[in-house]
Amino acid sequence: MTTPQYDLSNTLPPHTLTRLAREWLAEDTPNFDPAGLCVGSHEVEARLLCKTPCSMLAGRPFFTAVFTELSCTVEWAHKEGAQLGPNAVTQTAVVRGPARCILLGERPALNCLARASGIATRCSQLQSIAREAGWHGHVAGTRKTTPGFRLVEKYAMLVGGVSIHRQDLSGMVMLKDNHIWASGSITQAVRDARSVCGFSSKIEVECGSREEGSEAATAGADIVMLDNFKPQELHAAAKLLKEEFPSVLIEASGGVTPDSLPQYLSPHVDIISLGCITQGCPVVDFSLKVQKPVPFPIIFQSK
């Protein structure tokens, strides 16, 4: 696991971070905060602890944005993309601010960090598998993300070192089986899509056989997705398609897991996308602990 080369927080518009932080806080506290009465607004310090060794830290901008909305400050001990551990508990940051405000932001901020760090950790592991095997294609995510949480999850993919694939339906044209069936044929679907997306968008077609892949490439598809192929079938189909259409990108998808990924690696496959990057991905265990004030000792002087 390595720290990303760039400051990926620069990809996140400040107004978007502010909007998301406000939405998460409003969801968690839509009206009264009765527990806030118990703790008040005196200044306290809370330590952010990571309790999952050998995890990759991801999601700092979202965590910080939540507490910034609450007039709190965050001091980080580790960079984005850093490996946390190997100790059982790693102090990751310190949050300072009014007690009730820290507690208002605790759960939304921890949710972001736990989810993003879990995804980044898995992505880093997948990338390591591919690189150790000498494969130089793209490990990629999918649109199988949590509703309302896609930006966090796609950002975590970047921290983990994999491709985010398309961000949404507007980002690239992907013609899946239902598009093909509804339009009548692969050729017709590609032609119709090209008439509106023009030269600036790529077109990808989901194919269930090498013959469908050949039809898609002939019709002008930029990317052919070989969906739900067994590894050996994938290698054979990808090789033939690359020989016939050298400039077309070949993507493998469907049922690929961290354990089975090595079986799908091929010099004729350019992209391997995995839904398990976001679906069923373990989270990283973080907790936020408010520090008890240390009383000053009372010193009695003898007369």
Image (spheres, rainbow, N blue to C red):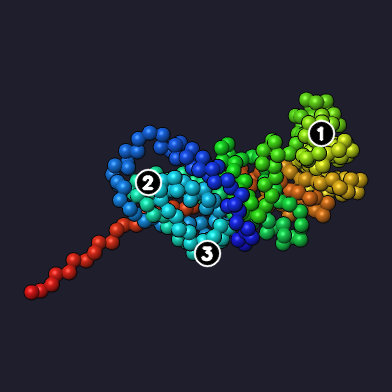
Quadrant into which the N terminus falls: bottom right
Q: Which residue is mark 1?
A: 194
Tell which of 264 and 38 is nearer to you.
Answer: 38
Q: Earlier in the sequence, mark 1 or mark 3?
A: 3
Q: Residue furthest left?
A: 303
The kind of secondary structure element at disc 2 is helix
Query: Does residue 170 appear anywhere in the picture?
Result: yes
Measuring from the top left, give residue 272's x and y in whole percent: 74, 48
Numbered tag placed on residue 101 in the rendering: 2
Amino acid tagged 2? Cys
Earlier residue among tags 1 and 2: 2
**Mark 2 to mark 3: distance in Å?**
31 Å
Q: Of helix, strand and loop, which one carries label 1? A: helix
C-beta proximity under 8 Å, tags 1 and 3: no
Q: Residue under label 3, please give it.
A: 86
Q: Which label lies toward us, 2 or 3?
A: 2
Kindly identify the residue that appears in the image at 84 percent across and 45 percent down.
248
User: Mark 1 and mark 2: span between their CA atoms?
Assistant: 51 Å
Label 1: few (<14), some or many (≥20) within 10 Å?
A: some
Badge 1 amino acid: Arg
Assess disc 2: are there few (<14), some (14-19) or many (≥20) residues with their C-alpha within 10 Å of its C-alpha.
many
Vertical comparison of 184 with 216: above or below: above
